[in-house]
Amino acid sequence: MLALLVLLAVIPVSASAQIGGDQGWYVIHCNVDGTSVYFDGEYKGMIAGGELNVPVYTTATPYSTVRVEKDGYTSDEESLSPAPGQGETRDIYVTLNPTPPQKEGSPSRPTPQVHRYI
């Protein structure tokens, strides 16, 4: 048994068997800095300078959606284009719009009604 463990310890692992592999990139472009970016619900970072570069492994399960959100703006969710190949970049453009202001005098939640019986 000890000989088997020693033998396994000296066998090199090939690069193709390791986690990872070739990379491509999505570049998410957005009109609002500080926007949070999610791929299939997994946080990827924040928009800075109008964009966020997200590396993806070409051998991994491809992501299907990107969602961007920031307080004070209506969130946006888009389908991702086909995954980039090795060394390729896919540009995704999203636009956030400010959340419409609430009309003055309209409550943000229903006002409870009080009933008094005399």
Image (cartoon, grey):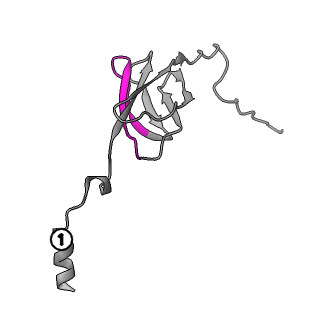
- Quarter of the image holding residue 44? top left
- Residue 59: x, y in percent? 40, 46
Q: Nearer the viewer, residue 77 or 92?
A: 92
Say which residue appears at 53% left-offset and 16% top-offset: 98
Q: Residue at x 31, y 53 (%)?
A: 16
Q: Is residue 52 magenta?
A: yes
Residue at coordinates 54% horizontally, 16% vertically from top-left?
Answer: 97
Q: Given the image, on which type of amino acid does mark 1 rest?
A: Ala
Residue 18 spot, x, y in % from top left:
29, 55
Disc 1 secondary structure class:
helix
Callout 1 environment at 10 Å: few (<14), some (14 to 19), or many (20+)? few
Q: Is residue 3 left or right of residue 109?
A: left
Q: Which residue is mark 1?
A: 9
Q: Quadrant of the N terminus?
A: bottom left
Q: Is residue 76 above or below residue 3?
A: above
Residue stretch in magenta: 43-59
Kindly give the residue lying farthest to the bottom in the view shown: 1
The quarter of the picture where the C terminus appears is top right
Position of residue 116 measured from the top left corner of the image (x, y, whole percent)? 79, 37
Q: Residue 20, image x and y in percent?
A: 32, 48
Task: Residue at 41% x, 35% y: name it.
Answer: 85
Q: Is residue 37 magenta?
A: no
